[in-house]
Each structure stands twice: as C-alpha cells, then as structure tokens.
Image: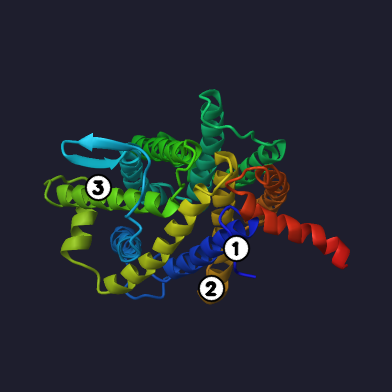
Amino acid sequence: MWKTEPGSTGRLVQLSLAMFSFYVIFGVATKAFTGPTAVVVPQMSGMSFTVWSTLGGSLMCLAVVFLGGWYRGKSTRHLSLGSLKVPSEMAYIIPSGLFTAIIIPTTTLLYILLKSVMVAMVIMRASVILSSRLVDEIQKRQGILKKRVYWEENVAVAFALAAASTQILLAKSGDFDFVHNKAALLVLGAFVLAYALRIYIMNYYRNTRSPGAEQNNKWYFSIEQISASSALLIAALFFLHSGLHARPVVELQAAVGSPDAHWPLATVVGMIYGMVAFFGVFIFMFKGRTATFSGLAYSETSLAAGTAATLISAFVYHAAFPSSADWGSLALIAVAFTFLGLAERKRMLELSADPELHQAVSEPLEQAATVPAAR
C-alpha cells in the first residue's frame, strides 16, 4: 500500500498527506505558544517564536541534507570556477535559495502586519496559485514547458481563487488596513515576487532536464536549503549588529539577546515545520506535472490543513471554531481537488507514453484497469 514509484499518483498522495499532517501538527502546536488561547505561560511574542521556530526548521532541514548525503548530486553539465568544476544548475538553484530566505521572514511579517491571519494566509496562497499558472504560461511561450495545462487544471485554479475570494469578501473591513500601510505592501510585494521567481526556477530545473539527466529533487532541496540558511544567518548577524532601531530589528535583538524560557520547545515545533518544507518542495517539483498543478496541490493542501488546525485548536484550546467563510472555502477547495484529480488521471495516461516514467505509471494504470474486472 505504501510502496510507490517516483512520478506515480500514489507517491503524490503520500506527499500531500504527509505535508497535511505535519502542517496540522505545527498549526496546533503554534497556538500553544502564541495568541489569546496560548497554554504556554508566559506567552511568547510573535518574533521570539518566529526566531526559534525558524532555527528549528533550518536545523531539521540541514540535518537531513547532510546526514542523508543529499548534497552529493550529479550533473551532466558543469561550470568552471578556476580549477573547480561545479554543476551548472547551481547557478540558479543558489538564487532560488536566496528567494527562499526572503520568503521565510516575509511570511512571518505578513502574519504580524496583517490583522487577520486567515486573510494573510489566503492572500499568500492565492499569489502562489496565480504565480504557478503564470510560470506555466511564460515557460510555454519560451518553449521550456512541453506539456499542456489541461482545462481541468484551469477550472481548479478558478475554484481555488473563489475559495480565497470567499475569505476576503467576508472579512472585516479592518482586516484590510494594510492597503494603507507602506511597510505591509512592501513586504507583500517582496513575498509575491520572491515566490514567483522561486517557482519559475523550480520549474526551469524540472522542465530542462536533458536526456539521461536525473531530476534529483533531494539534491535541489539540499542546495536551496544550504543557500537559504546561509543567507538567513548572514542577515540575522547583520541586523543584530546594525544598530538600527526599527521595531522588527529591536524585537529580533530582544528575542536573541534575552531568549524566552520556552525557546527550546519553540525550536522543536520549528523542526515539525521543517518537515512541512520537505514535502512542500517535493510537491512543487513533482515529476511530470505542470507548475499550475503543483502550485494548486501545495496551496490547497496547506489551506485545508489550516482549517483542520483551527478546528482541532477549538477543541483543544477552546479557541474560535472555523467560521462560515472557512467552511465555504473548504467546500470550494474540495471541488478544486476534484478537478485536480480529473487532471491527474489525464496526466497519468499521457505519462504512460514517456519512457522515463513508463515504469512509474504502468503499475497504477494496470491496477485501475483491473478493479472493475475484480468486482
């Protein structure tokens, strides 16, 4: 049941379920440290929790990368740096890591700057969906993307955006004060641009594999995470010693200089989010799929996990139950997932003609064909 092949529907389902599970655990655990229903006393500040949970996530990713030897990748093309030869892919994977380093803090800042957490989440996920669809269109015109985007995927995009619109339309007017906040708009712009460029690079790597060249997602992830962690470390050291008095910098200095008593637990919770990062990247770069499909699978899984975490927190911490807008969005997401499933069935039939993925898709197709006969 759990044995699947790379590129198969079963593997995709496993990655989505794993990401959903860890995301729910992280979401519920976060409520224990922050917010009005926090059970950790004294309650941690948003910046303090962010600093230590980010550290935990980075340590988890780097530990797996180095202990698993994922950084030892092979390439058919190399660049010469003096006497040193490095894989040519590193010329754009390292920048992808730098964009990831921008995404991590801007995500947290958006949750801090925007009054409504749900509005912040929806805006970010909607930007991922739109960026993914735009990347497919650009790479199609560049001749990089050879696959077509099925109409079912476009319908799924429409329903996913409808789910986002439901949250935005039913939100309180005060939740949109950020449109008059230059700092919030600047952070949002940085997030959207960084994510769009990162998605482009991921799909450039996925769609430009030459014959015989392996799509090694583990190696890509390792280089990206090493680059991102290095950039975050350098940035943190800069701001800690910059002498700047901006509020986020002062809060960062306080979080590191006078660590909260619960920082070890926050670091452990961050390690859980590090697991989300694994599965998220592997979904984004899943073999044989379009950026539209992968972006939808990632965004819808995280939105569903957010609703589930809210529901569990309501029972565990007596927090607020999901609103009618949350349930309405979840219903629309379910419809979007249905159309994604239809697109997936078409894609599997298409990939069965691909020699590289024939073995990965033949088994699921054969099983699907034999089910009616067995009945």
The type of residue carrying mark 1 is Thr
**In the figure, residue 253 lies in which quadrant?**
bottom left
Whole-Å distance between the Cαs marked 3 and 1?
A: 35 Å
Left or right: where 27 falls relative to 307: left
Q: Which tag is nearer the camera, tag 2 or tag 3? A: 3
Mark 3 sits on what residue? 231
**In the figure, residue 42 lies in which quadrant?**
bottom left
Q: How is the image coloured?
A: rainbow
Q: Residue 95: x, y in percent?
A: 32, 39
Whole-Å distance between the Cαs marked 2 and 1?
A: 39 Å
The type of residue carrying mark 2 is His
Q: Secondary structure at mark 1?
A: loop
Left or right: where 263 falls relative to 314: left
Between 302 and 294, the one lying in front of the other is 294
Whether 9 is drawn above or below 204: the answer is below
Residue positioned 72% across, 44% down in the render: 346
Mark 2 sits on what residue? 318
Between 375 and 248, the one lying in front of the other is 375
Q: Residue 153: x, y in percent?
A: 67, 40
Q: Secondary structure at mark 3?
A: helix
Mark 1 sits on what residue? 4
Q: Residue furthest top?
A: 141
Q: Residue 80: x, y in percent?
A: 23, 35
Q: Residue 241: x, y in percent?
A: 11, 50
Whole-Å distance between the Cαs marked 2 and 3?
A: 39 Å
